[in-house]
Amino acid sequence: MTYFYYKTNSWSSQPQVSEDQIKFWKHLSEKKNWRITQLPNGYYQTEFKDQDDSWQDVTRRETLDGAEAAIDGSIEHYNKKLDYIKGPKVVKTFE
């Protein structure tokens, strides 16, 4: 017989994000901190510059356009994270 354990959490407020994490997300949301390199097998690798100026590989794509689209998607992702920490957005109100 198999038993499953489920745990749920509820918060009365949003989980707190550290200042270092926010700084890192802001860093990743700027395109100047990204680059594309071509690998010996012909694939393109997306990389971001870490805060200590070393390059970290992220994804590999077959085309240059695909690699740039991956970077643009990552930037959009981190911008959404930065918007999230501002609090919930009101999408509709009722009178």
Image (cartoon, rainbow, N blue to C red):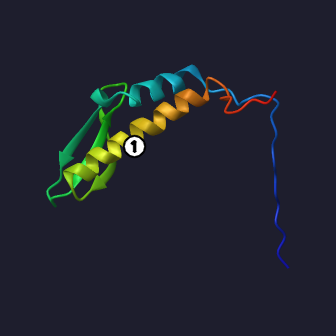
The image quarter containing residue 43 is bottom left
Residue 70 in view here: yes
Return the residue nearer the eye: 24 or 13.
Answer: 13
> Which quadrant of the rendered structure holds the N terminus?
bottom right
Q: Position of residue 88 (x, y in %)?
A: 68, 29
What is the x, y in percent for residue 84? 60, 30
Name the outermost residue toward the bottom: 1
For this view, does 64 lie left or right of residue 14? left
- In the rendered image, which quarter contains the C terminus? top right
Total marks in image: 1
Name the amino acid, label 1.
Answer: Gly
Q: Residue at x 34, y 47 (%)?
A: 70
User: 33 above or below 62?
Assistant: above
The percent coordinates of residue 80 (x first, y second) are 52, 34
- SS at badge 1: helix
Residue found 40% across the figure and 31% down from its top: 28
Asked whether residue 57 appears in the rendered view, the answer is no
Q: Residue at x 31, y 46 (%)?
A: 69
Q: Is residue 8 left or right of residue 41?
A: right
Few, some or many residues within 10 Å of mark 1 (<14, 14–19, 20+): few
Query: In x, y percent, where is residue 9?
Result: 81, 43
Quarter of the view holding residue 50: top left
Residue pushed farthest front?
95
Instruction: Report whether 11 appears left or right of 60.
Output: right
4 or 79, nearer to the observer: 79
Q: Which residue is mark 1?
A: 73
